Amino acid sequence: MSLSRRVMNLSRSATLAVTAKAKRLKAEGVDVSSFGAGEPDFDTPEFIKEAAIKAIRDGFTKYTPSTGAPALKQAIQKKFQEENHLEYSLDQIVVGNGAKHSLFNIIQVICEQGDEIIIPGPYWVSYPQMVLASEGVPITVKTGAETGYKLTPDLLQRNITDKTRAVIINSPSNPTGVVYSRAELTALAELAVDRGLYLISDEIYEQLVYDQVEHVSVASLSDKIFARTFTVNGVSKAYSMTGWRIGYLAGPQEEVEKISQLQDHSTSCPNSIAQMAALAALEAPKDSVRQMREEFLRRRDYMLKRISAMSSLTAIKPSGAFYVFCDISLTGLDSAAFATRLLEEARVAVIPGAGFGYDRFIRLSFASSLEQIAKGLDRLENWLKTR
Ligand code: PMP
Ligand code: GLU
């Protein structure tokens, strides 16, 4: 079979695969404790659903402009101004079918065959694959405990070549939950811009930060940085709207115009009804977000406390998102063997770290009820003791 070079090196998403497998087993009646979920377990808030129903009743069921309905783009523009200190014009904003789609489009537009994109590890599973789909070369950079699992200017510097086009920053990070400080972002961004790179800032977990940690939008740090940065966000995580598929990007005008053209000829507009639901989400007070964040914080603390009592696991303390990335080196197993055995022998689903570039780690999501988390951790603890 001869297929295009662009797709030859792609693989399935480990996060989606494990989550789907756990859901399937549950549907078959198997009592699985799943730590796979990359989505909040809360229902989409009622007022958001109502906005979608109203959109249907009002006949808002036709194509919108392919970069998004003007009302939604205005709400995104206002959100950027008020929450992120970013002044984007409407034609610098494109609404897509999820942040994943927005990221994909950015990479398609800036990266061509052989171009390198720097991706600090541990990284979200889809970034290297998106670069491969653009025939680019993902340059994954290992970070460790000594830098708090963050990219540093020194590490960045060492990985820049004359082929480097961009660096991806994901803060708060999936899978580690680490959040970059203003000073850390400034140092990285200044170096990147001085070397003529783009910054791709994935801020999808922006609303989910704990311990008074501040989320900073890298594009807000200076005009020079703003001019080279793509900011990506969406409603999936903050409003528990993963299935609605609305994300958005903003960035430099010329590049965003190319993304608009790409979107014109690939997906057209995102679903009109979901756009109205996203508009309601963005315009509402943040009560539901705050409640969700408080609940996530309780779960994070509980999970960290339980894991610290398991002698063969070491957790990275997340300041954001809803994952705990755990070092499993002391078990002597690689991440796939650990995850497979844990699922088969104890009915607990976790995501192997290999997909995030760290084969001695697993990712546990705390996007499920405290009761479910407690049950799953009991099983994990017993399994570790008896295996
Ligand atoms: N970035 C990161 C780091 C994520 O974890 C996700 C989760 N799917 C996304 C982007 C994409 O989110 P969505 O496409 O649902 O907006
Ligand atoms: N981003 C989530 C995760 O990492 C959802 C699945 C995906 O899109 O990768 O689990």
Image (cartoon, rainbow, N blue to C red):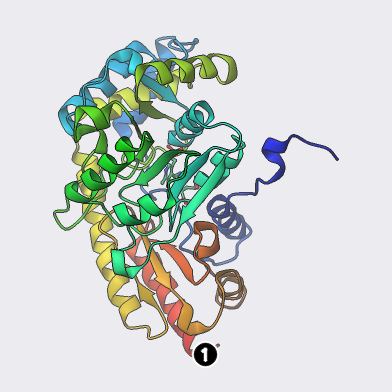
Is 279 on the left or on the right of 2, as rendered?
left
Q: Quadrant of residue 276?
A: top left
Q: Is residue 133 visible?
A: yes
On the image, the x and y values in percent for residue 226 come to 26, 29
Q: Nearer the viewer, residue 224 or 78?
A: 224
Q: Can residue 239 be seen at all in this image of the molecule?
A: no
Q: Residue at x 21, y 27 (%)?
A: 223
Closer to us: 309 or 29: 309
Rendering quarter of residue 94? top left
Relative to 67, say whether 346 is above or below: below
Q: Residue furthest right?
A: 1
Residue 310: where, in percent of width, then height? Answer: 37, 83
Q: Which one is in front, 149 or 340?
A: 149
Mark 1 residue CB less than 8 A from any atom of ligand 2: no
Residue 293 horizontal/vertical position (percent): 24, 50
Ligand 1 sits in quadrant:
top left
Give me the residue at 39% from left, 38% from top: 236
Rendered-image quadrant of the C terminus:
bottom right
Quarter of the image holding residue 342?
bottom right
Q: Tell me if 254 is positioned left or right of 32 in this view.
A: left
Q: Secondary structure at mark 1?
A: helix
Q: Which residue is mark 1?
A: 386
Which residue is rendered at x = 47% and y = 69% of the image? 361
Give the quadrant of the N terminus.
Answer: top right
Question: Which amino acid, mark 1?
Answer: Thr
Query: In the rendered picture of this protein, how many numbered marks are placed on residues?
Result: 1
| Residue furthest front as drawn | 162
Say above or below: 91 vs 76: above
Q: Quick one: label 1, few (<14), some, or many (20+) residues within 10 Å? A: few
Q: Which residue is the extreme one toward the left?
A: 212
Residue 241, image x and y in percent?
40, 37
